[in-house]
């Protein structure tokens, strides 16, 4: 495996760095040690940052040119992501729109939908969210219960979604609904674009244990969606959702690029804090830092497997699952080592200098282990697809959803 850029990739990277340097003054930056920013507080600045990057040709790199993208490669997209992380530009506000919703509209939307939505999405004129998970369907996504019922030229939607990242700042979402409960659970689904400002849509932010509110509950009460906002045919929602999930898989699993600055921050933190710890705690903290750095390097190199598949024109499968697992483990160990280095200060919400980044990061990491496929589900994928273990029994593929226990135990 060759970890170095090819000459073309090196030239592209140099161009990206030059563009970031040129627009340096117009971009929102993370302060040292900060790993993310609150989208609600910084919404206007984050939208402006994405717009500047879009106008510089650094957003939607692999999207086809006809939809406002650059017609580039997924490797070039990875290079842009790495350079944005290196320049401490926060994750783009519309990252879900760019990585998942937009490609779904490209793949399954009408020309009218593509014309209306895609250019605005790339420039963060509209922010998008992904309305899939529900209280009783996450890993088992096809068990969802939010209904859409046809009424003339509209569909009427009722139900609840949960965990919806960015819904509180979103203008549109892709919404997976059940339109035919008499068909097997994967066959009775339909996907729509929903206007998040439509009457009957209620967004309720959820407060996380780190204090921030990145995701939300979203309630739909008699929300009317025109049939022209359907993505794909009625009953084909699962096929459309697979496009979204495949793009999610491409978007995640490359944690290695983002881990570099975190390890540097940890190393600096260790230099600052180790001398103040008593000898026994120093030993334990050194070991924790060592384990974290090894895990972070492991995540980086596991991430290169995904890059290798991308550079060969493929779509990462189990490589993305392994990359996400390794990245999550590294993030957990880095955060734990950071907190351990604080000694007794870790007991307080903020350290003496008012910085609680390590506690906040530690509180955030469990979410990473759930979002976009839980650790356990990813291990199932690796077990089945890499180790060749027998698949889990799936006995609900043929019965009507209405007859299944997941529809409230009707049987
Ligand atoms: C930070 C964050 C952001 C998110 N953003 C979004 C978003 O924008 N849009 C959206 O639609 N969703 C989003 N989600 C939801 C996410 O996709 C789900 O939380 C995830 O799929 C897990 O589903 P669940 O929470 O229902 O847990 P469940 O699926 O109920 O799982 C509960 C536990 O059972 C385990 N488990 C489940 N099935 C199996 C199995 N077959 N084998 C072994 N163990 C199993 C799981 O690993 C877990 O430990 C987000 C979640 C988080 C944490």
Image: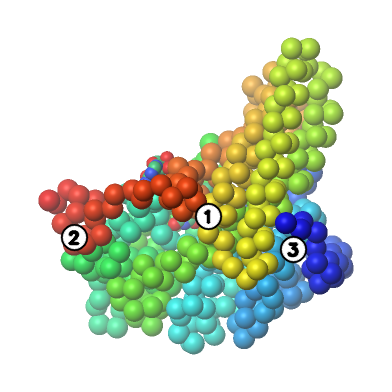
The quarter in which the N terminus is drawn is: bottom right
Camera-side residue: 321 or 32?
A: 321
| Residue lying at 41% horizontally and 76% vertically, measured from the top left | 231
Sequence-earlier tag: 1 or 3: 3
* Marks 1 and 3, how far apart at CA: 21 Å
Relative image position of residue 396 (x, y in whole percent): 24, 55
Q: Does the closest atom of ligand 1 sit within 8 Å of the Cβ of label 3?
A: no
Colour scheme of this structure image?
rainbow
Query: Is 270 rendered above or below residue 213?
Result: above
* Marks 2 and 3, how far apart at CA: 46 Å
Instruction: Give SS at disc 3.
Output: helix
* Marks 2 and 1, how far apart at CA: 29 Å
| Residue lying at 72% horizontally and 24% vertically, measured from the top left | 287
Label for residue 318? 1
Relative image position of residue 279 (x, y in whole percent): 78, 12
| Residue lying at 65% horizontally and 83% vertically, measured from the top left | 65
Q: Does the closest atom of ligand 1 sit within 8 Å of the Cβ of label 2?
A: no
Label for residue 51? none
Instruction: Give SS at disc 1.
Output: helix
| Residue lying at 69% horizontally and 76% vertically, measured from the top left | 72
Q: Which residue is mark 2?
A: 399
Q: Which residue is mark 3?
A: 79
Camera-side residue: 2 or 142?
A: 2
């Amino acid at each position: 495996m060759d970890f170095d850029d090819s000459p073309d990739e090196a030239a592209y990277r140099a161009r990206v760095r030059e563009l970031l340097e040129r627009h340096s003054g117009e971009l929102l930056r993370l302060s040292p040690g900060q790993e993310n920013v609150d989208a609600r507080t910084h919404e206007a600045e984050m939208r402006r940052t994405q717009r500047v990057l879009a106008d510089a040709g650094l957003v939607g790199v692999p999207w086809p040119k006809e939809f406002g993208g650059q017609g580039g490669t997924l490797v070039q997209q990875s290079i842009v992501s790495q350079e944005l992380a290196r320049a401490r530009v926060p994750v783009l506000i519309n990252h879900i729109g760019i990585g998942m919703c937009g490609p779904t509209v490209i793949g399954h939307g009408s020309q009218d939908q593509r014309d209306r939505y895609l250019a605005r999405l790339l420039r963060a004129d509209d922010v998008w969210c992904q309305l899939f998970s529900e209280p009783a369907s996450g890993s088992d996504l096809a068990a969802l219960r939010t209904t859409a019922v046809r009424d003339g030229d509209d569909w009427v939607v009722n139900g609840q979604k949960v965990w919806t990242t960015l819904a509180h700042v979103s203008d549109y979402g892709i919404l997976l609904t059940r339109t035919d409960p008499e068909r097997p659970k994967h066959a009775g689904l339909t996907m729509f674009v929903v206007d998040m400002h439509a009457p009957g849509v209620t967004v309720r932010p959820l407060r996380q244990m780190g204090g921030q509110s990145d995701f939300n509950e979203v309630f739909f009460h008699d929300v009317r969606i025109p049939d022209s906002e359907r993505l794909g045919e009625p009953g084909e929602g699962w096929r459309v959702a697979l496009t979204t999930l495949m793009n999610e898989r491409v978007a995640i699993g490359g944690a290695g690029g983002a881990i570099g600055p975190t390890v540097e921050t940890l190393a600096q933190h260790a230099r600052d804090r180790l001398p103040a710890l008593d000898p026994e705690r120093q030993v334990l903290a050194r070991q924790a830092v060592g384990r974290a750095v090894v895990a972070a390097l492991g995540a980086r190199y596991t991430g290169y497997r995904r890059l290798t598949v991308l550079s060969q024109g493929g779509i990462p499968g189990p490589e993305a699952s392994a990359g996400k697992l390794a990245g999550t483990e590294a993030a957990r160990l880095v955060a734990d080592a950071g907190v351990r280095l604080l000694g007794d200060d870790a007991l307080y919400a903020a350290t003496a200098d008012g910085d609680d980044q390590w506690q906040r990061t530690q509180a955030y990491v469990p979410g990473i282990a759930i979002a976009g496929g839980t650790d356990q589900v990813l291990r199932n994928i690796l077990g089945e697809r890499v180790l060749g273990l027998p698949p889990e029994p799936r006995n609900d593929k043929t019965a009507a959803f209405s007859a299944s226990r997941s529809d409230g135990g009707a049987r």
